[in-house]
Amino acid sequence: MNQAVIFDMDGVICHTNPFHSLAFKEFFAKRDLHPTEEEFASHMYGKSNSYIMSHFFGRKIEGQELLDLEDEKESLFREIYQHHVDPISGFLEFFHGLKENGYKTGVATSAPQANLDLIAGKLDLFPHFGSALASENVTKHKPDPEVYLKSAANLQVDPENCLVFEDSFSGITAGLKAGMKVVAVLSSHTMAELPESHFYINDYREITQDKVKSLLAI
């Protein structure tokens, strides 16, 4: 069997969005900006830092300015989240079950490497990943499929033999564009807010190894 399961990280391995909100609130408050929760839901969850900052600052944030601001915000996030790393219900059992059933596994996140190091490090996932890609590893971010196509190449698995777990519109779009099967994790959005996926779960207690097998057989 040469099949793989690839996970996004934020909202898929851990429910980090509330902590990203806290970090962004602190980041924006320093600049006397106070976005509402509704604005965050529309313009933060599943979006890149360049989009988020450009939207809320009302001008294009790019280049070195983006790198500096992103570093400041993500450092705030890690400071807040380091004491709260906690996987979504059932994740670890499900993940280790995949390995026992012979699937290759990877992670493909739009977050910076330092965030991946924090979360995957605390959960001891790195020894089990055949591919671990963060924002620094791609030139085009989701919804572009680059990160998923690179993951498949790293894992030496054809894209059609890969199953992706995603929670955002851009992430699901990236997985589908890569030609992969996609499970939508409803941690941040409702089914109606997301592209049509192959399966939907609220957490990992709602999916079995047999279901993974049947999804990959589609």
Image (cartoon, grey):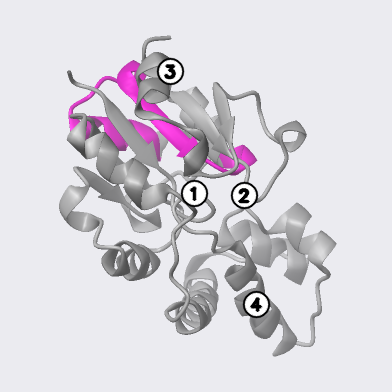
Q: Mark 2 points at which residue?
A: 187
Q: If the image is split into quadrants, where does the C terminus sit?
A: top left
Residue range (magenta): 147-170
Q: Name the residue under label 4.
A: 22
User: Dots 2 and 1: beta carbons under 8 Å?
Assistant: yes
Against 124, is 68 above or below?
below
Label 2 and label 1: CA atoms lie apart by 7 Å
Query: How far separated are the C-alphas under marks 2 and 4?
Result: 17 Å
Q: Left or right: where does residue 212 sit relative to residue 184?
A: left
Q: What residue type is labelled 2?
A: Ser
| Residue bearing mark 3 | 215
Relative placement, left or right, of 198 versus 149 is right
Mark 2 or 4, closer to the camera: 2
* Badge 1 amino acid: Val
Residue placed most toward the observer, 144 or 89 = 89
Please name the residue shown 48% across and 77% down the image.
81
Q: Residue 68: horizontal and vertical position, in percent?
A: 49, 78
Residue 60 visible within the image: no
* Marks 2 and 3, the one that precedes in the sequence: 2
Closer to the N terminus: mark 4 or mark 1? 1
The disc at residue 12 is 1
Residue type beneath disc 3: Leu
Measured Cα–Cα span from mark 2 to mark 3: 21 Å
Residue type, numbered disc 4: Leu
Kindly check if marks 2 and 3 are in contact, taking CB atoms under 8 A apart as contact: no
